[in-house]
Image: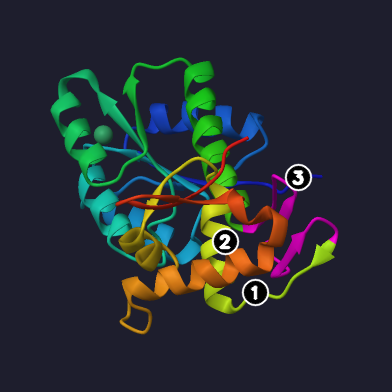
């Protein structure tokens, strides 16, 4: 059985809260409720739900402030936020999206629309986390990020930690060009230990290990590197 997602709903209007909770529970989600902004942010901090549905106009602290608090907190910023808004508050929604809300839904909404938006947000979240973990196959190479293994054809090849990070970055997005600067930032090597010039050295070493597959890591002159798209 797939795991049960937990959804925090912060809404001060009882009838709307009831409609939202009823429909989400019917879909098999666990619903955590709060009717006040301060109570809402406390609940989210404590429970770390999979998704937060925030009304904008709330007593205590409004939905925009809650969203801002979540998105500036490293331990909470991954939680997708869906803003629930009245039509007259659409300028607030723009503000909400600017500070990291994932989507919004305008009242009055149909239960079907609500459920569809929630599902879409959770799907994006799941895809993002699978992107971090899973196995990637491309052009005869295979990288297993979770087990930290790399294969050329059927043969396992040892990569240094920096080489492994570079290959997992490139292989996750075949065809996308990464600048040296991006590679540094995205592999977490921006702390000054690895300098941009060193990226070229790592790539040279990776290519040597790839043998006949070396052309899969392409140099884009004046820009950076990319993994060849089939
Ligand atoms: Ca309200």
- Taking the spot 22% from the left edge, 32% from the top edge, the residue there is 93
Q: Are marks 1 and 2 in contact (CB under 8 Å)?
A: yes
Mark in the foreground, 3 or 2: 2
Among numbered discs 1 and 2, the one appearing first in the sequence: 1
- Taking the spot 42% from the left edge, 70% from the top edge, the residue there is 199
Q: Which residues are magenta?
A: 133-154
- Taking the spot 28% from the left edge, 49% from the top edge, the residue there is 67
Horizontal arrangement in the rendering, residue 75 relative to residue 148 (left or right): left
Up/down of 167 relative to 215, above or below: below
- Taking the spot 68% from the left edge, 36% from the top edge, the residue there is 28
* Residue 197 painted magenta: no
Q: Secondary structure at mark 1?
A: loop
Mark in the foreground, 3 or 1: 1
Where in the figure is residue 146, as x and y percent of width and height? 69, 65
* Residue 139 painted magenta: yes
Q: Residues within 10 Å of mark 2 (few under 14, many from 20)?
A: many
- Frontmost residue, 198 versus 86: 198
CA–CA distance in space, label 3 to label 2? 31 Å
CA–CA distance in space, label 3 to label 1? 35 Å
Q: Residues within 10 Å of mark 3 (few under 14, many from 20)?
A: few
Among numbered discs 3 and 2, the one appearing first in the sequence: 3
What residue is disc 2 on? Answer: 167
Any mark on residue 2, and which?
3
What residue is disc 1 on? Answer: 159
């Amino acid at each position: 059985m797939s795991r049960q997602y937990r959804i925090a709903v912060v809404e001060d209007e009882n009838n709307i809260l009831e409609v939202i909770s009823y429909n989400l529970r019917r879909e098999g989600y666990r619903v955590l409720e709060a009717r006040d902004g301060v109570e809402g942010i406390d609940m989210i901090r404590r429970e770390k739900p999979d998704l937060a549905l925030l009304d904008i106009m709330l007593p205590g602290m409004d939905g925009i402030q809650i969203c801002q608090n979540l998105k500036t907190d490293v331990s909470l910023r991954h939680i997708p936020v869906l803003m629930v808004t009245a039509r007259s508050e659409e300028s607030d929604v723009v503000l909400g999206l600017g500070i990291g809300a994932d989507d919004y839904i305008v009242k009055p909404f149909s239960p079907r629309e609500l459920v569809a938006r929630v599902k879409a947000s959770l799907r994006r979240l799941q895809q993002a986390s699978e992107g971090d973990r899973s196995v990637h196959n491309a052009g005869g190479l295979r990288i297993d990020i979770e087990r930290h293994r790399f294969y050329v054809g059927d043969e396992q090849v040892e990569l240094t930690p920096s080489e492994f990070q570079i290959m997992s970055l490139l292989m996750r997005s075949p065809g996308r060009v990464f600048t040296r600067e991006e590679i540094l930032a995205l592999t977490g090597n921006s702390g000054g230990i690895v300098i941009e010039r060193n990226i070229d050295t790592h790539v040279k070493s990776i290519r040597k290990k790839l043998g006949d597959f070396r052309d899969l890591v392409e140099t884009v002159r004046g820009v950076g590197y990319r993994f060849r798209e089939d």
